[in-house]
Image (cartoon, grey):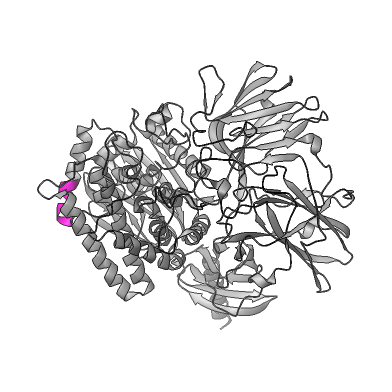
């Protein structure tokens, strides 16, 4: 009997070990503090083969919730969560935590404060308050919301590693707050809280074509703070913003998120954030109304400094003029150490390219700037020295896109290559994808695509980090699959979809840039761009198996589609930007906008079925059929399979977005292939065609043609950029185009997703999303000898490797726990268990080894 008991215990222990879980997250964040979601989503990855999870949630060791699931994500449905409360949760013995924040607006105690200056005043305001703690502190949390940007200091130290907080929103409709654990920053006795405010997009003092300087929310930066202290005796105290705070200004004499930042070290107030500082000359603060009545937690990954890049080279033109090259194009700031006489003015101009004489050239990125005077030069930081150096300068409230920094000083200064560094910044999304192949050029294209994606992720997806920094909708949905294959970006996208809901007009219309100060409702906002409201929530569902964004956006998606329908009674939509920046051939706007109208309606119909709106499902399914019929009646020649003029964009858009009747797919694909050959095996597409051309070819039997386009080295191509020194993707196919010439744009970034979908063949299954069931359909183009590719899904790592071995192709597929896969080659193979699977393909014959 004892033998069997011990055996049972041993089996139980082994089962528990196999069932342990990793990557425990709450709302896709690791042990977050300050969340407001009353039903947070708990997720994990299995470290074994079990199909069951046992979840427990505790507060102070008291069990509040106990449930089981066969999934790897579940929403909390237990007793109501309380504000300012830490919870622990377990899944199969593995432990994590989360902590609630305000939860409700009425829990804020602080008053919104600012200084007494008008919006035109340039120096950044400083704020401080000193308070006394006499009891032993158990924990302390700082909750801070702002209109504008802030840095939080306590007792002389900047708190946290976040940059450019809070994230940009439509400030008069939604304001974000951030929570910090400041327990270890407080001390017994006197403590000082210090806050520096920057303008950000809230008080845009620079002038450009999008009129952010006229935004309806614009005002002098403001903030509200509650510092909540819990003592070891169980009592609490809250130090809040109010009339007892004081304000002044310091060394930051100008800051613009768009252009640059200016520091005058002669105005520095040393130790202003320490208790001993004498603030008798400081002014009382001004009380302000909150920017909005909707103050919510910033439940997303922050912007951080990702990499510090030393200068690759330095060129000295004179003792007042230097040129630094950091080796590759990045988004972020420069950090420079300077020493010189008091009053010396040093300017740092940031550029992506150089003039033939070696000086910084910003003519490709300053085209939309409309300065009113010469005090705010574009992409330029200005530092005025105090003669007490050396000092190291880094902007606090700005970022730029650049590779080169030209330094000009009013008096001679001595610099070395080590004097300057590049600080690479972006939303701190976790890398979850990797791609390598036998084609080194293709590998460099993948890396450049990822670099451009990250350079354009700053709490929302942007088009470029220098010329605009705008959330162009079309650029974002085109690149969303690339982002989701390579990075765990759901928190950024969910935040941005909330921005969409803030910006939608009552009639359903969205602007072309989101957030916006009002610009973009009248230009560039056809369905080819603003399909973000449908495409991105749908992609989040496919990649994460999470319906949250779809459910939240469904009413907005429906209003959006309905207003297009009201304006398009014949099923054809005639407005939009069209196939932006094409090589040469121009596709009609009605063609591409109708294709995206159809796509949005199709997604809406699927979402309706998924969410249980049966009548909506039937209505929008019929509408999609109506649009498809109207589109094909207008553009399709059924005898030849040619759409309109048979351009690359026309054929590929119809194929990729499933507008081609099933019976004519092979004809339409053959016509596309013929067109590519007639175009001398060269790309002839713009933005929208870039999304579809490679997919339409590889999905319809023409992988060799797709690969030839993807790996091409002649202009126009991605490879042409790389061969000419690009480390990021460009905005235009010609390197020396007269306009539209940013050198760090993500809009041509679909190739990054295509590498996963076609060459590795890794795809989510709509019927079992989140990679619960995986479609593996790799293609083997002539001229490519091997591919090694992986994607870390919600269930764990999916890996596909293949290589040519004489007449064979050896394919290895590795699946994570609790997933299955269908491998689609010349025949289908079902893989029903995790681990590695080896498949040999010999002259079309497929063998599972």
Could you say which quadrant of the image residue 831 lies in? bottom left
Which residue is painted at 83% across and 60% down in the image? 244
Would residue 737 be counted in the magenta stretch? no
Q: Is residue 328 above or below residue 62?
A: above
Q: Is residue 13 above or below residue 766?
A: below
User: Camera-side residue: 19 or 278?
Assistant: 278
Left or right: residue 732 versus residue 281 is left
Secondary structure that dominates the magenta span: helix
> What is the residue that sits farthest to the bottom in this orientation?
1
In this rendering, would 844 be left or right of 800?
left
Give 676 or 745, whichever is nearer the viewer: 745
The quarter of the rendered structure image containing the N terminus is bottom right
Image: magenta residue range:
662-668
The image shows residue 489, relative to residue 21, as above or below, that is above
Work out which residue is located at the far left of the displayed protein and give it. 639
Q: Quadrant of residue 628?
A: bottom left
Residue 152 percent across, percent down from the top left: 73, 52
Q: Is residue 242 left or right of residue 522?
A: right
């Amino acid at each position: 009997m004892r033998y069997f008991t011990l055996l049972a215990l041993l089996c139980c222990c082994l089962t528990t070990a196999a069932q342990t879980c990793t990557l425990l997250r709450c709302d896709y964040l690791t042990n977050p503090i300050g969340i407001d979601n009353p039903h947070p989503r708990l997720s994990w990855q299995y470290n074994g083969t079990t199909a069951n999870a046992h979840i427990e949630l505790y507060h102070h060791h008291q069990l509040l919730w106990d449930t089981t699931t066969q999934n790897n994500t579940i929403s909390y449905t237990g007793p109501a969560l309380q504000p300012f409360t830490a919870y622990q949760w377990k899944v199969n013995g593995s432990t994590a935590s989360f902590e609630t924040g305000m939860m409700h607006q009425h829990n804020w105690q602080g008053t919104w404060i600012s200084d007494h200056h008008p919006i035109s005043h340039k120096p950044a305001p400083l704020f401080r308050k000193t308070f006394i703690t006499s009891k032993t502190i158990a924990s302390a949390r700082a909750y801070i919301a702002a209109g504008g940007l802030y840095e939080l200091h306590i007792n002389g130290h900047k708190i946290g590693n976040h940059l450019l907080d809070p994230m940009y929103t439509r400030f008069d409709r939604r304001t974000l707050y951030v929570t910090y654990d400041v327990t270890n920053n407080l001390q017994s006795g006197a403590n000082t809280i210090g806050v520096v405010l920057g303008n950000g997009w809230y008080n845009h003092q620079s002038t450009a074509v999008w009129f952010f300087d006229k935004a309806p929310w614009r005002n002098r930066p403001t903030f509200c703070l509650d510092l909540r202290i819990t003592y070891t005796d169980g009592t609490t105290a809250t130090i809040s913003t109010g009339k007892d705070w004081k304000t002044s200004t310091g060394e930051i004499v100008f800051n613009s998120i768009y252009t640059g930042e200016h520091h005058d070290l002669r105005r520095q107030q040393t130790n202003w954030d320490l208790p001993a500082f004498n603030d008798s000359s400081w002014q009382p603060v001004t009380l302000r109304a909150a920017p909005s009545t909707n103050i919510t937690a910033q439940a997303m990954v922050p912007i951080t400094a990702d990499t510090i890049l030393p200068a690759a080279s330095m060129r000295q033109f004179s003792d007042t003029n230097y040129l630094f090259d950091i080796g590759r194009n990045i988004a972020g700031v420069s950090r420079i150490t300077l020493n010189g006489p008091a009053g010396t003015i040093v300017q740092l101009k940031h550029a992506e390219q150089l003039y033939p004489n070696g000086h910084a050239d910003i003519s490709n990125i300053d085209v939309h700037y409309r300065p009113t005077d010469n005090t705010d030069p574009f992409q330029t930081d200005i530092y005025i020295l105090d003669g007490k150096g050396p000092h190291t300068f880094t902007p606090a409230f700005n970022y730029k896109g650049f590779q080169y920094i030209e330094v000009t000083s009013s008096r001679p200064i001595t610099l070395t290559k080590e004097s300057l560094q590049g600080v690479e910044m972006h939303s701190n999304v976790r890398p979850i994808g990797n791609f390598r192949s036998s084609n080194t050029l293709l590998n460099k294209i993948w890396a450049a695509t990822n670099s451009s994606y990250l350079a354009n992720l700053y709490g929302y997806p942007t088009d470029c980090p220098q010329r605009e920094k705008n959330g162009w909708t079309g650029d974002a949905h085109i690149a969303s699959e690339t982002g989701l294959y390579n990075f765990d970006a759901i928190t950024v996208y969910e935040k941005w979809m909330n921005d969409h809901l803030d910006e939608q007009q009552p009639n359903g219309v969205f602007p072309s840039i989101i957030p916006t100060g009002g610009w973009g409702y009248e230009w560039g906002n056809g369905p080819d761009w603003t399909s973000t409201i449908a495409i991105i929530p749908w992609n989040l569902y496919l990649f994460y198996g999470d319906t949250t964004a779809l459910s939240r956006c469904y009413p907005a998606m429906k209003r959006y589609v309905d207003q297009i329908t009201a304006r398009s009674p014949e099923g054809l939509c005639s407005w939009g930007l069209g196939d932006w920046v094409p090589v040469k051939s121009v596709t009609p706007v009605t063609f591409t906008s109708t294709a995206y109208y159809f796509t949005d309606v199709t997604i809406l119909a699927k979402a309706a079925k998924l969410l249980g709106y049966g009548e909506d499902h039937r209505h929008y399914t019929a509408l999609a059929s109506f649009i498809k019929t109207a589109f094909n009646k207008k553009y399709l020649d059924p005898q030849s399979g040619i759409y309109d003029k048979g351009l690359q964009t026309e054929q590929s858009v119809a194929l990729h977005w499933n507008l081609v009747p099933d019976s004519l797919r092979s004809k339409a694909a053959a016509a596309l292939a013929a067109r590519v050959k007639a175009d001398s095996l060269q790309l002839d597409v713009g933005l929208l065609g870039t999304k579809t051309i490679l997919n339409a070819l590889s999905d319809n039997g023409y992988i060799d043609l797709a690969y030839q386009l993807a790996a091409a080295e002649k202009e126009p191509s991605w490879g042409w950029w790389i061969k000419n020194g690009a480390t990021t993707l460009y905005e235009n196919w010609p390197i020396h185009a007269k306009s539209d010439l940013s050198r760090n744009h993500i809009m041509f970034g679909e190739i990054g997703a295509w590498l996963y979908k076609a060459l590795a063949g890794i795809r989510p299954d709509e019927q079992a999303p989140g990679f619960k069931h995986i479609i593996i359909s790799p293609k083997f183009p002539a001229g490519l000898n091997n591919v090694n590719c992986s994607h870390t899904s919600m269930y764990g790592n999916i890996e596909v490797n293949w290589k040519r071995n004489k007449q064979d192709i050896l394919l290895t597929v590795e699946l994570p726990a609790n997933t299955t896969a269908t491998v689609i080659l010349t025949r289908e193979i079902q893989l029903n268990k995790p681990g590695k699977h080896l498949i040999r393909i010999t002259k079309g014959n497929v063998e599972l080894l």
